[in-house]
Image (cartoon, rainbow, N blue to C red):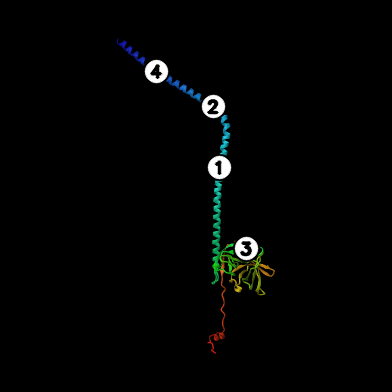
Amino acid sequence: MEFLGQDKREGLGRKAHSRFVLVLLMLVSILLLLSSLYSAQASVFKKAREGVMDAASPILSFFSAPINYVHDVAGSVGDYFNVMEQNEALRAENAELRQWMVEALELRETVATYNALQGYQAPPSAQPVTAFVIGESNDAFARSMIVNAGRARNVEVGQAVVDDHGLIGRIVEAGGAASRVLLLTDIQSRIPVYVEGADIEGILVGNTRVNPVITVTVTSDDVEIAPGQRVMTSGSGGALPRGLPVGEVSGERNGGIVVDLYTNYARTRMVRVINYAFPTVDPVEDEATAADSDQPPVEG
């Protein structure tokens, strides 16, 4: 009996185990089936997608060329306008920088000219008036400048005008706020001068086309003139102060002495008007006249 029960239990155990194995195999089979179906479906979709891409590739290539061209043109046009805007901005910036550069150069030139003018030592009685050149009058026969200083600043006719290099001329017309300067190169200009280091005095006569020439008035027979000797104002007649630099001797022409002027009118922007009062000498009375003037008048 015991064997019969034992066989029965063992048969039931084997049965249960077989069922479990069968169920397990069925689950594995189902999983493998699903996996194979998914793989087949994925392969089908992949092949379909690749076929669509292959079919659409020529069409996309055909339409992509004009699209890319339009895109490139649009980008080029946009870049062109951006470059134009940048160029306009750079032009404006360059114009502003050039203006500042011009102003800086003018300021530097003004400061340098003023510093050079400071080196000029005027006579004790002279009162220099600083002025700027505001106009020029140059033609076949006239050489003159207009400066922004006139009678309101004690500028009078006949006064000398100098720049940082030397004498440029003299005042011939004085208005309230402006004056006209007759340059040394004007044909009407006559300036008393002397040659430094030589016993020579004369009148510097202007010439509109060439350098002015000294017409000698005082000289000695054995004087020799050499190029490079300085020419200065002599102060004769009290018209101009003595010792203003005029130029250098450069040679001779028609019996006169050619002078190379120190000043360069093309660069003259700031000048000084020498408000010079020529000193006067009081007359000296002799002793007899002084004694007679001291005696009281005789009553008749």
Q: Earlier in the sequence, mark 4 or mark 2?
A: 4
Q: Residue furthest right?
A: 254
The kind of residue tagged 3 is Ser
In the picture provided, is 256 more to the left or to the right than 36? right
Provide the secondary structure element on which disc 3 rests: strand
Kindly identify which residue carries mark 2.
52
Left or right, residue 220 beside residue 88: right
Q: Position of residue 39 (x, y in %)?
A: 48, 23
Question: The residue under label 2 is which amino acid type?
Answer: Val
- Tell me the residue at 33%/12% (across/down): 8
Q: Which disc, if any, is residue 23?
A: 4
At mark 4, the secondary structure is helix
Specify the quadrant of the image occupied by residue 287. bottom right
Residue at the spot of label 1? 79
Give the residue pinned by disc 3: 137
Q: Position of residue 274 (x, y in %)?
A: 56, 69
Work out whether mark 3 precedes mark 1 in sequence or the reverse, and give the earlier one. 1
- In space, the residues marked 3 and 2 are separated at their CA atoms by 90 Å
